[in-house]
Amino acid sequence: MSFLIGEEVLYRGDRYSISIARRAEPYQYRLVRTTEDGAEVVWAQANELEKIKTYTEPRDDTQAFRGSRPKRK
């Protein structure tokens, strides 16, 4: 699985953004996130990362919007 710079990912259950992708072995990604104590930076390998499923899996949410528009007379 590959990831892009700027992409949001899950690492150990927490959401991070990828800030650097190392293209030579060992392939690693520098991740950043904001915490109450300030910025947190960690390095992780691709096999430790997960794509955020709500961004990558389609869902049919149009049912919630059907009938919300007033009908024409």
Image (spheres, rainbow, N blue to C red):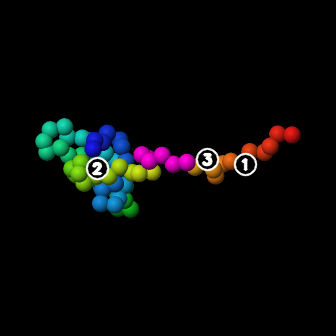
Give whichever of discs 2 and 1 has the lower sequence position: 2
Q: Amino acid at mark 3?
A: Thr
Image position, residue 18 (x, y; %)? 31, 45
Disc 1 on helix, strand or loop?
A: loop
Q: Amino acid at mark 2?
A: Leu
Q: Which residue is tagged 2?
A: 31
Disc 3 on helix, strand or loop?
A: helix
Determine the residue positioned at 30% across, 42% down.
3
Give whichever of discs 3 and 1 has the lower sequence position: 3
Crowdedness near tag 2: few (<14), some (14–19) or many (≥20) residues, C-alpha within 10 Å: many
**Which disc number belongs to residue 67?**
1
- Give the vertical position of 6 relative to 39 (above or below): above
The CA span between labels 2 and 1 is: 43 Å
Q: Quadrant of residue 2?
A: top left
**Do labels 2 and 1 touch, CB within 8 Å?**
no
The CA span between labels 3 and 2 is: 34 Å
The CA span between labels 3 and 1 is: 10 Å
Q: Quadrant of residue 15?
A: bottom left
Crowdedness near tag 3: few (<14), some (14–19) or many (≥20) residues, C-alpha within 10 Å: few
Image position, residue 65 (x, y; %)? 66, 48
Determine the main secondary structure of the stretch shown in magenta: loop
Image position, residue 28 (x, y; %)? 20, 46
Furthest toward the right, the residue is 73
Give whichever of discs 3 and 2 has the lower sequence position: 2
Query: In the image, which residues are magenta?
Result: 55-60
Question: Where is the C terminus found, in terms of image quarters?
Answer: top right
Furthest toward the left, the residue is 25
Q: Which residue is tagged 3?
A: 62
